[in-house]
Image (cartoon, rainbow, N blue to C red):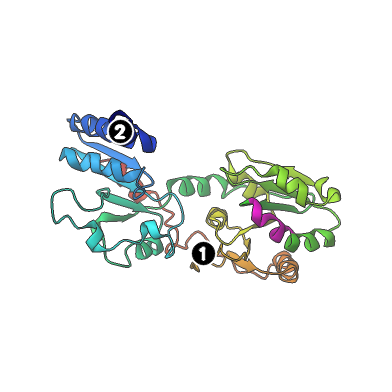
Amino acid sequence: MLAYEFQKVVFDQNYVFVNYLWMRNHFSLCKHKTNIFFQDEFYPTGGRFISQAINRTNNKNMTSYGVQHGIIYEGHTVYNMTPVELECNKPFNGLPKPHKFILWGDFFKEVLNKNKAFADDELVVAGNLNYIVTAEKYKKLNNKNSVPGILWCTANDYLIKDQFDILKPLLASLTDYQLVIRFHPMLNIKDKLIEVIDKDIMNKVVFKNDNDIFDAIFKADIILAITASSIFMDALVLNKMVFQFKIDGHILSDFPNKNTLVIDSEEKLIQAYNDLLEGKYAKDQLSSQKLLHMSDGKWREILSV
């Protein structure tokens, strides 16, 4: 029984304890200026033990950077921290955190620090480097489809029917189109989609799940996702509109951009699509700095140290 309990402590939970010990020993040996970048900064089996390993070494050569990798909003409880949680009233007993946290824009900085848990210089608004590079890549390209290109970024399988019920009348109103369907990277629900989508529509469906979401967004005339999806952020980078299905239980907070329209009925989707074709939406440009910082200057500064 004792051996079993020891194994549970040491090796369960994705080898967290063993990984922590290895990292602590490795980081303590760094004799030159070293920056460590990681995500999942405040998840128990991710960033916390990395931060704790670095902090325990007390190695002044080490600087740890948490890097925002997804949407931070008020309901995202892992990022809803207070000063009491982070305070070290005894050595190393506060919630482990990186030395610096790199954020996509001032909006996310305000949300993360609404409880004043971080010092201002701990939060660095540098932008999403992938977004910055992608915007530069696509800004001079043009795309013209022979038929309307509809990109549907799906989510969990139990949400599919509600979304398709809203989408189906729009498809019926079009003489020709191509429906490109992408899955969430962790959810391949092709079989469920085949069950839900009418056979005549399946003839115009392309399943595409390559790594480059931006290529699919660039080629699309209309983009569909649920309101809890971060696809609208990717679309903002390419100055594209996203129509977001409003599904109960999957609603994020409002974000300061004009590129997203919430759709809760088939009538609203058809009207929105027609309005889009007529150019009635004033879309945010990449100068929407509050949500997305789109200059690489801060990253160059960080990486040069």
Q: Which residue is mark 1?
A: 252
Judge left or right: residue 27 versus residue 187: left
Residue 263 lies, with reference to residue 158, above or below; the image says below
Write the start and end of the magenta stretch as one range: 157-164
Determine the CA span between mark 2 and mark 1. Answer: 38 Å
Q: Residues within 10 Å of mark 2 (few under 14, many from 20)?
A: some
Amino acid identity at mark 1: Leu
The structure residue drawn at horizontal position 13% and vertical position 52%, both measured from the top left corner, is 90
Q: Nearer the viewer, mark 2 or mark 1?
A: 2
- Secondary structure mostly seen in magenta is helix
Query: Dot 2 lies on which element?
Result: helix
Check disc 2 and report the residue beneath it.
10
| Above or below 167: residue 49 | above
Residue placed most toward the observer, 206 or 23: 23
**Quadrant into which the N terminus falls:** top left
Q: Nearer the viewer, residue 188 or 39?
A: 188
Across and down, in percent, residue 194 comes to 76, 46
Q: Position of residue 276 (x, y in %)?
A: 70, 65
Number of numbered discs overlaid on the protein picture: 2
Specify whether residue 240 is painted magenta. Answer: no
Q: Residue at x 13, y 49 (%)?
A: 91
- The amino acid marked with disc number 2 is Val
Looking at this view, name the residue that lies furthest to the front: 1
Residue density around tag 1, few if under 14, some if 14–19, many if 20 or more, within 10 Å: some
In this image, 254 relative to 297: left or right? right
Question: Residue 83 is drawn in which quadrant?
Answer: bottom left
**Left or right: residue 141 compared with residue 295:** right
Describe the element under mark 1 as helix, strand or loop.
loop
* Residue 98 seen in this snapshot: yes
Residue 230, percent from left and from top: 53, 55
Q: Is residue 162 magenta?
A: yes
Task: Return the disc, 2 or 1, that comes first in the chain's sequence.
Answer: 2
